[in-house]
Image (cartoon, helix red, strand yellow):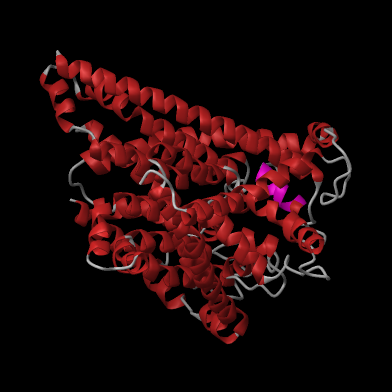
Amino acid sequence: MTRMSWFNAVSLTLGFAFLYIPMVILVIFSFNESKLVTVWAGFSTKWYGELLQNEAFLNAAWVTVKVAVMSSTIATVLGTMAAYVLVRGGRFMGRTLFSGMIYAPLVMPEVITGLSLLLLFIGIGLDRGVMTIVLAHTTFSMCYVSVVVSSRLVTFDKSLEEAALDLGCSPSEAFRLVTLPIIAPAVISGWLLAFTLSLDDLVIASFTSGPSATTLPIKIFSAVRLGVSPEINALSTLMIAIVTVGVITASLVTKRQMVRQKRDEQAAART
Amino acid sequence: MMRRFFLISVPYLWLLALFLVPFVIVLKISLSDVALARPPYMPQFDWATGIGAFLSELDFENFTWLTEDDLYWKAYLSSLKIALISTFFTLLVGYPMAYGMARAPQEWRPTLMMLVILPFWTSFLIRVYAWMGILSNEGFLNQFLLWTGVISEPLTILNTNSAVYIGIVYTYLPFMILPIYSALERLDGSLIEAAEDLGCSRLTAFWLVTIPLSRPGIIAGSFLVFIPVLGEFVIPSLLGGSSTLMIGKVLWEEFFSNRDWPVASAVAVVLLLILVIPIVLFQRNQQKQQEAEQ
């Protein structure tokens, strides 16, 4: 089919309009002069200025980034280990429980995860703060990382690893020199996924944070409960801009990498 | 050998300590004495007295409480209702989009795909917030409808269940589109041509060939929407009104406002028991699909 039918064109246009118009409106009204978010009163960037002077938001943003970097990094290491064990580990005691624990957090309602972790932290007398949020975020995001990485591990040719071992690599060298470079794109996208999940999380962070550590979503949520405000629009616009740039860059980089990898594989096949 | 042990045990212990043990604690508190368990609850498990004493102390008071107070029944039922209806609407909006994407020229597809995924990377909270400005009484939707003359009085949408439905369809749409798209993209076009050659109209061919063959995608997408929506908290509390009853919100309030931990735990346990059914069905569907691919 060379041309789209009008039905498909209309449903795609309406669908994407539905997905994007709310965000476009949000962005436009972040540049509104008036405090009233719904009435246009001229262009202004004053809300961005106010946002940058709002210490509470800046602090919360810093806590959020710290938590996201730490939790996604630990989650990537643990999740990759878990994926490797599940795909290559063979049989071991309690394997079913292990894979169950990897998949369960993916479908567990956030309110339950949050509640259970809070009760644990209180039970063992751990003070709630940045550390407890990192522990909580690591736990659920390592499961996402492991799903992403294991889907890559399943498709890759095991004989490459075996060849490295036959040629005298130690298992850890084989992993570092052969396996890791091949699964690297999946590991990176796992990290990115874990990072955004952590940035985005409101419910679990609300349960596991203490008065000393407020994350940005918690801050936004309590501000938004009182109604719409141009400052939140400005903040949202900044976040949308960062994500858009990030996703587009990431997709361009992976595309280039895939082209290069294909070329390398073809070159290897020729020699 | 050492290395393998290390690889297995580190993530294993992490999940045991931070996933399984917390859940056992929730189960425990949901069964603990209400009087003792007023916050801070009294941890009842005492290793010295052992399992026997522990078991004899269990009581199901919190669960009988859940059945007696009809707030909880209504909240579970209304969460199920909201989840079912919004899954249906998400399918209604998502299917034509997935279909259009699968039929779009090959070179457009990666871009369309990215356009569907992009909102997923943007903050959930912000996407819900965006609708608050649109649906309020002075919001854009009302302004637009008043301007076009469709209505003469602003409609009240924000803080009603309709706003919750709109919010859910909006935020969960990518979860519905992607599995349906991947089912439709694999669909062999010659099957539809064959049906048409054999005398089916386009619509009958769509109904008899395309829909059944995309069923695994429809099922997967529906569960991916239904399961998380059941425990949803952010959407009902920002877009819904005081009459919007959803169990995630009830659990949150039970914990943060009423500070009744045993009841909050019991609410969580029952929610999980309800979720087991769709989760098992979803897993089965995924497994069947995987086997079919091999």
Front in this rendered view, residue A218 or A156: A156
Q: Please tell me in which quadrant of the rendered image residue A66 appears.
A: top right
Q: Residue at x 40, y 74 (%)?
A: B55
Residue B89 located left or right of residue A234:
left
Q: How many marks?
A: 0
Residue A170 located left or right of residue A239:
left
Q: Quadrant of the N terminus of chain B?
A: top left
Q: Most prominent secondary structure in the magenta stretch?
A: helix
Q: Please tell me in which quadrant of the rendered image residue B10 appears.
A: top left
Front in this rendered view, residue A135 or B141: B141
Above or below, comparing residue B149 to residue B9 in the picture: below
Above or below, comparing residue A270 to residue A141 in the picture: above
The answer, for residue B284, to whether it is visible in the render is yes
The answer, for residue B47, to whether it is visible in the render is no
Q: Which residues are magenta?
A: A216-223
Q: Residue at x 69, y 52 (%)?
A: B129
The answer to if A222 sits in the magenta stretch is yes
Q: Position of residue A97 (x, y in %)?
A: 30, 55
Q: Position of residue A92 (x, y in %)?
A: 20, 47
Residue B65 located left or right of residue B6:
right
Q: Position of residue B260 (x, y in %)?
A: 64, 69
Q: In the image as oriented, which residue stretches furthest toward the top? A: A271
Q: Please tell me in which quadrant of the rendered image residue B67 appears.
A: bottom right
The answer to if A188 sits in the magenta stretch is no
Q: Residue at x 34, y 26 (%)?
A: A258
Q: Position of residue B31 (x, y in %)?
A: 49, 73
Front in this rendered view, residue B58 or A29: A29
